[in-house]
Image (tube, grey):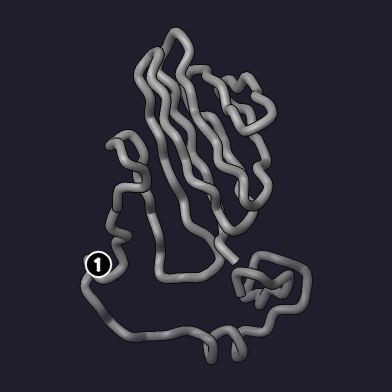
Amino acid sequence: MANSDNVIRAGLTPKLRDIPNLVNTLTYAAAPASRHVVKPLPFAASSTSTLYDPPISEFSVVTTTLAPGQTEGHRKIDGPSITIAVGGKGKIRWADGSLDVVRGEVVFIGADIAIDLFAAEEKFEIYRAFVEV
């Protein structure tokens, strides 16, 4: 249901509640917690970007933490992405432009655009969610 506007409600709402349908969609397979842990992988040549690629096709997430003055290049991605800066300030650069970014700002990046992330005078931490189509 990740790409759906449909919701099966079970309570805490005056709207239609469909408890039998909700129960029928649940999976009751027990498994150790380690089965559900998304293992981090390197995303770029350096060790400053980490990829979290869950076993679903909807999205993956890259986290990048840069020291002051440090730069990290990200390859082209075959789909759109969205970033959120969660710490510090820096710059996102692409072939024909750049944008200053500070903590709390969100930036949309179109498909097939390689970017460079640059940390200004302080540590810069940014998350990038993307889908490769």
| Residue that sits furthest to the top in the current view | 121
- Circle 1: residue type: Ala
Q: Residue at the spot x=45%, y=18% of the render?
A: 119
Name the quarter where the C terminus is drawn: bottom right
Q: Position of residue 132 (x, y in %)?
A: 55, 62
Q: Is residue 92 left or right of residue 4?
A: left
Q: Number of numbered discs present?
A: 1
Establish if 63 lies above or below 18.
above
Q: Residue at the spot x=65%, y=24% of the render?
A: 98
Q: Is residue 46 left or right of residue 15?
A: left
Q: Position of residue 55 (x, y in %)?
A: 41, 70
Q: Position of residue 125 (x, y in %)?
A: 44, 28
What is the secondary structure assignment of the residue under circle 1?
helix
Picture quarter containing residue 9?
bottom right
Q: Position of residue 16 (x, y in %)?
A: 76, 78
Establish if 42 lies above or below 120.
below
Residue nearest the viewer, comparing 83 with 92:
92
Q: Residue at the spot x=46%, y=50% of the render?
A: 61
Q: Is residue 24 left or right of residue 38?
A: right
Q: Residue at the spot x=29%, y=52% of the render?
A: 40
Residue nearest the viewer, comparing 28 with 42:
42
| Residue that sits furthest to the right in the current view | 15
Judge the density around disc 1: few (<14), some (14-19), many (≥20) Cα neighbours within 10 Å. few
Name the quarter where the N terminus is drawn: bottom right
Residue nearest the viewer, comparing 96 with 20:
96
- Residue at the spot of label 1: 33
